[in-house]
Image (cartoon, helix red, strand yellow):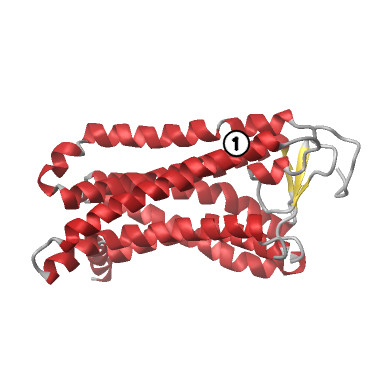
Amino acid sequence: MPESNATDFTNPSIFILQGIPGLEAAHVWISIPFCAMYIIAILGNFTILIIVKKEPSLYGPMYYFLCMLAINDLILSTCILPKMLAIFWLNSREISFSACLTQLYIIHGFSVMESGLFVAMALDRYVAICDPLRHSTILTNSVVAKISLAVVLRGGVLVLPYPFLVKRWLYCRTNIIPQPYCTHIGVVNLACGDIRISSYYGLFVQFCVMGLDVVFIALTYTQILRAIFRLPTKDARLKTFETCVSHLCAILIIYIPGLFFSLTQRFAQNVPLPFHVLIANLSLLMPPMLNPIIYGVKTKEIRGRLLRLFSQKGT
């Protein structure tokens, strides 16, 4: 199908992913940091999984959720980056309609799951700090499994209408998506007719995820900080707060870029399109790269296991 604003099709068999509009000449150079991000994400998240599997002392709720986060990040980055690099390196910009639906479902579904995992990890920190004596009895393996299942089901069910909404529209404008991957709003914006249902439902999901999750995490950490400040000594307060640092850093990395992208997309209409696309890419691809680094550096147990692993290899 030619890359033009065709008006003679209603249901395209393929879409054309434009990459980063306006920066096509620099795609090869832009691909270098994105390729590095993907390699770091793969190595970092697999390292987290291997360390937790090999270290029985890490068998606990926090590390179970961390393993789920690592798997989630591996799937999310692998769903996006190989096709993106194929666009940048090989100019392979075509994607079938069904593959586009699959990609947008995975991107949105696993993004929702990632937010849910941060809520679950905040709950774990709350119980560990505010009620430490009952931590093991409250967050049993059965409870952790139920929380994990709820996180997965929430992501899968909330995003399930997206591909069905995309399929119901007629596409009579163009089949060119001004991004390097498929997203719900990116595809339905190409449709002709009234797409308010898709727009409203997308806002509803964003409110359920970003809004409610951020509120829950904020309330949880308010209680955590109150408990920390009630500790008798400064050393005890610092030591307890250090157990939350990695989680807080990861929360800032996932929510702040996402919030910034959402605000610029809706209110900064004069911002150039390439900037919008780059911010969207970073908001999706930075967390899978940085999460294992943050937890590897800031979590004492994982850092100690890494140091022992490298010291053994060095001898």
Q: Nearer the viewer, residue 218 or 2?
A: 218
Q: Label 1 sits on what residue type? A: Tyr
Give me the residue at 23% from left, 71% from top.
315
Which picture quadrant has residue 81?
bottom right
In the picture, measured across the screen, residue 64 lies left or right of residue 88, that is left
In the picture, measured across the screen, residue 106 lies left or right of residue 273, that is left
Q: Position of residue 128 (x, y in %)?
A: 19, 50
Q: Is residue 167 above or below residue 88?
A: above
Give me the residue at 71% from left, 60% from top.
269
Placement of the N terminus among the 4 image quadrants: top right
Q: Nearer the viewer, residue 286 or 25?
A: 286
Residue bearing the label numbered 1: 201
The answer to whether residue 101 is seen in the rendering is yes
Q: Is residue 200 above or below residue 306?
A: above
Q: Position of residue 218 (x, y in %)?
A: 35, 53
Kind of element beneath mark 1 = helix
